[in-house]
Each structure stands twice: as structure tokens, then as C-alpha cells.
Image (cartoon, rainbow, N blue to C red):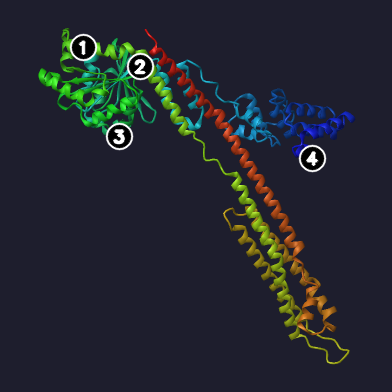
Amino acid sequence: RHLAHTGRADEALVLALAGVAATPSSPAALGALREAYAGAGRWPEALAVARREAEAGAPVAAPTRLALALASRDLSELGAIAAAPGEAPNAASTIPLVALRAFLAGHATDDELLALARVAPDEGARRFVAAARAPAAPPEQDLLGLLAWAHELAARTPALAELTVAAGRAVEAFDRPLLVAVMGEFNAGKSSFVNALVGEEVAPTGVTPTTATVNILRHGPSTGARIAYHDGTTRELGAASVAPFLRELSDAEAARVRVVEIFHPLEALRRVEIVDTPGWNALRAEHEKVARDFLVEADALVWVFAVGQAAKASEKEALELARGAGKRVLGVLNKIDGADDDDVRAVIAHVRSSVGGLVEDIVPFSAKRALASKGAGRADAALASLDAALERQFFGAARSLKRATALAALRRFVSAATAATSPPAAPDFAARRAALDATDARLRGALAKERVALRARIDEAYRAAAFEVRDFVRPRAWLFGEHRAEPADERFLVELLEDALERAATTTREVLLAAATAGEAPAPPDLARAIDDAVARFDAYARGAIEGGAVAEFFRAELPRLRLEPAAIRDALLRRAPDPEPTLFAPLGHALEAAHERAHAALDDDERDAEIQRLLREEHVEGPLAALARAVAALDENDRSRDRAPS
């Protein structure tokens, strides 16, 4: 056993195997062999020996059996332990039985996995526990599967809870029609543009910028709307209520709205869903984040410029954000019905020179004229040109745009999840151990000094008492007489010595407590109580010794014929003085040693728990996120290879 526990496993096994060969059913020999196998990390063999011990009538302790089963990854043995008769799931047990049963059932929480992993004897066994309930590998070359996998990871990981909604929206958006966000400055005619695009008055116009909301136009079996609020609640509206609701919305109500989904049974909306946003320069604080989210969540953007105020600095800033998000942007110069052809050409040239690199194309358009033409059944050249640009830039590339949006969402998810689950700074356990040892050395040094100092104070107390005795004792009057003292003198000396020793011990207490709280790493908290207890024990012992006969014996046996000199009186008194070693210093030394061992054991537990938490992060979050990042990179590379391939 000694060899097994000191790293000499091969030697231990030779001896242990010889012992079992000589006495095959000896519990002592089998136990030594089990420990030798365990010392060598040969866990299945150690578990097999434990079974032989049980057959021999000497079963190993439950925690040891559990540790061996975990290290061996032996699910049948773990099941047998969990099903042991007489063990209730909620009963106090020497093993984490509830955690074990939850582990085997596949629904253990992180706290239960932590409790079970504490029993595991090495990192491999602890990783075996930590890997339970870890997510399956993300699906390869399956974009929708990766989106769903990311959503499930966020839903099951508390640290990623804030990403769950965005991940869910990415899953839902992948199979929906192309999502195009219509953006621009306030009063650029975005809602009118939307109405002209779909051929009907579906987007509300005339809404003031202070109460504007983010609206999504979607296909539905009938006209209506659903209001989604920031608090997660929703509200349904009938067809007749949509426009009045949006136009009469109060500031307070608008602040509560996250997005308005407007449904129409229009064929155009089967192909494209349109996000109609408030003016970029008139966003409420509550809607700015929503609008910026759609800037990256949309599959493509249409930026509506107004003839009279095109390509402002704020528009360029927004378009740079869109380009940074990898979005295609089609520029539409609206309200050209209010300008002549030369002015329109001049504005287009200005827009191209200012933001031309940020938009795919710039299409001149009049939403008002196009909608009127549709209503009258006439063709509109600008609308036809716009439809062609949309087909060329967006609809013809819908599949690749949807994939690009989904891949971007996955990349954002990986980045945000990695930031949200970044591990805390690893504790410096070596430094903490060094600090514990320094504290122990400081306390032992203080204890050694006080062994000398307290005895010196006791000696001084008895020296001072000797002078008092000399002063109140009446010396013998003739050669064969005796020195005499009154009973009151005896009581006086008792009180004098008790007070002096109490002060001396109190000084020792203060010195030791000061040493316990000095330095960067204070002593274990239970050590202060041990110091108080030791000093109180010595005080009680000293009082008992002084009152219980030491002083009386001095007066009766020593004083009558003692030479009345302070040194002789002190020596006589000291022979009966209480010794602080057995009642104060020896117990306190043992307490200090025990406290130091407990502190190191607690530090070992902290380090093991930190390792388990690291393994849980690796198995449940870091590893899965790394696998997701690799899967996304592989899809990216495949898409790029496909784009490079000749048609």
C-alpha cells in the first residue's frame, strides 16, 4: 500500500499479486492489490478486485466503489450502485446518490455533475462525468441543422440565455421568403415605396416620427396584424384596426412595441417579406436597436433616398454599417416626380460619388406615380426598371442571400457566445498554497516565541510575588521558630498570582491573534477560536492550581523554614507554578497543525472543483462552440468554392 500511494506502482503490483497468489481470499491481500491497481491507474482491474473483495465478504466502502466505477466508465457497475437496496434518493448518503441517478438517467444538472465528479479519482474520470449531457456534435454541411443546433445550445446553457431569441429568429427566418429591409431618412417616402412595390396600400403612411414603429409586411391568409412588445407579450389586430392603431399610437405605447407584423394575402409577399422601418434620423431609442438588428438580420436592404436630401452624412454612416455586415444594398432615388430629368441625373451623379461604393445600383423612382399607374392599370417604366433591379440583385440570388444571412447569424452567435462564456481568470493555487505555508510558518514562529515569552512573564510574576511575600511575612523571633503569615496574606497571594498569570496569558493571546491576522493570507477562521479556547483552558488550569493547593502548600511546607530572600521565595513558588505547555501550547500546536491541514484540504477541494468547472465548460460550451465554428467555416469554404467554380 505504501508503494502504491508513493508512485511506485510496478513494485506495489509485484508484491500485491504475490500476496494474493499466496492467500487468494485474504481481504487484506485483495485490498492491497486493489490499491496497487488504482495507484497504477488500471481502474477496470481495480474494480474487478473490488468485486472479489465483496465475494470474499469484505465489500469496499461505497465511495471507493463509486470512484472505481467512474474511473472505469462502467455503466453497469454504476447502475448497480445506484440501485443499491436501502438507499433512498433523498437520504443522507456517503455518496452523491441523487446525482448518480440523475447522471444515469441523462438529466443531471451542472451542480449534480459537479457533486458526482468530486468522487472521480482522476481527470479522465472527471471528464467522463462532465461529458454527460454535453451537446451532440453539430451537423456537418447542414445550414438549417446548424441554426437549430445553435438555438438548442443557447436554450440549454444559462450563460447563453440572452442569445436564445436571436438564435430562434435565425432558425425561423431561414425557411421564410427573402427578407428585405427598407431603410432611409425620415420623409424619404419609404412607406409609399413599399406600397408601390406590392401594388396596394399596405404600409401605413402619414405616421409621425415620434410614434413610428418597425413594421414587417408578411403574407397571411387574411389582412391583420400582430403587435410584439419588448416584454414578450403579443396582441392581435383585425384588418380594420391596423391603420388606426399605427396612426393613433401614443408615445408611451410606441415605446413598448418591438415590432409590428402586418399580414396581407398578396402574392408578392409570398416571394419577399418587407421590413418598413422608421426614418434613420428619427429613430426612438427603443426602436434603434431593433432597426440596427434588422440591418444585419435582413437578407438584403433597399435604401430610399429622397431627391431633395440624398446622400447625407448620416446615410453614408448607415450604409457603411450595412456593408460591414456584408449586406447587398439597392439604392432607390424616390420622389423624382418633383424634379426634372436634369436634376434627377445630377442627384444620381451626386449619390454615386458619395456612396456609390456602398450600394449595388441606384434606381430613380416615383412611388406616388408608380402606385397611381398600378391603380389605373397602366405600365410604369420606373417600376419596371425597379422590378428588374430587384430581380437581378435580390430575387435571382435569393438562395445565396438567405445562406449568407444564416451564416452571418451563426458567426455572430459564435462570437457572442464565446464572449458570454469566457472563463474567469484561473486562480493561482500555487500562490495560495505558498501563502498558506507562509501563514503557518508565521504562526508557528509566533507560538515558539510565546513559549519563551509566556514563561518569562510567569517568572516575572512570581519574582514580583516573592517581594510581596517577604514584606508581609513575620520572620521567626528565635532560632528554632518559624516564619508566619495570616490567612488574609494567603488569599492576597492567591489573587496576586491569578491576576498576574491572567495578564500574562492575555498578552500571549493578543500576540497569537495578531500573528493570525497579519500578512496577505490570514489564518484559518477557526484558529482564532482555538487560541481563545487554549488561553481560557490555561487560565482555568492556573486558577485551579493556585487555589487548589499550590499557595497553601507553599505556606505550609516551604515558608516556615525558608530563607526570607526574594530569590529563594521565588524558587519555592515557581516549583508549584502552572505549566502552560500541556494546557496551552501543546493543544494549540495540534490545533494549528490540524487547521493547516484543513486549509490545504479545502484548497485541494477548490482546485478540484475549478478543474471540474473547466471540464464542464469545455464539454458543454467551449468544445461545442469550437465545433460549430469549424462547421460554419467549412460551409463558408464550400460556398466560396462553388462560387469560384465555372458555371
Quadrant, the N terminus: top right
Q: Residue at x 76, y 27 (%)?
A: 45
As measured in the structure, the alpha-carbon distance from the residue carrying label 3 to the one carrying label 1 is 36 Å
User: Would you name the residue on which mark 4 appears?
Assistant: 2
- Element carrying mark 3: helix
- Element carrying mark 2: helix
Mark whose residue sits in front, 2 or 4: 4
In percent of width and height, residue 337 lies at 12, 18
Quadrant, the C terminus: top left
Of residues 642 and 496, the one drawn nearer to the viewer in this rendering: 642
Of residues 45 and 640, the one drawn nearer to the viewer in this rendering: 640
User: Would you name the residue on which mark 1 appears?
Assistant: 385
Q: What type is the residue that disc 1 sits on?
A: Ser
Q: Residues within 10 Å of mark 4 (few under 14, many from 20)?
A: few
Q: Residue 236, relative to residue 647: is it above or below?
A: below
Q: Which of the two discs, 3 and 1, labels the residue nearer the N terminus? A: 3
Q: Which of the two discs, 4 and 1, labels the residue nearer the N terminus? A: 4
The reply to whether the C-beta atoms of the residues labelled 4 and 1 are less than 8 Å apart is: no
User: Would you name the residue on which mark 3 appears?
Assistant: 285
Mark whose residue sits in front, 4 or 3: 4
- Element carrying mark 1: helix
Q: Which of the two discs, 2 and 4, labels the residue nearer the N terminus? A: 4
Report whether residue 266 is seen.
Answer: no
As measured in the structure, the alpha-carbon distance from the residue carrying label 2 to the one carrying label 3 is 29 Å
The reply to whether the C-beta atoms of the residues labelled 4 and 3 are less than 8 Å apart is: no
User: Would you name the residue on which mark 2 appears?
Assistant: 401
As measured in the structure, the alpha-carbon distance from the residue carrying label 4 to the one carrying label 1 is 89 Å
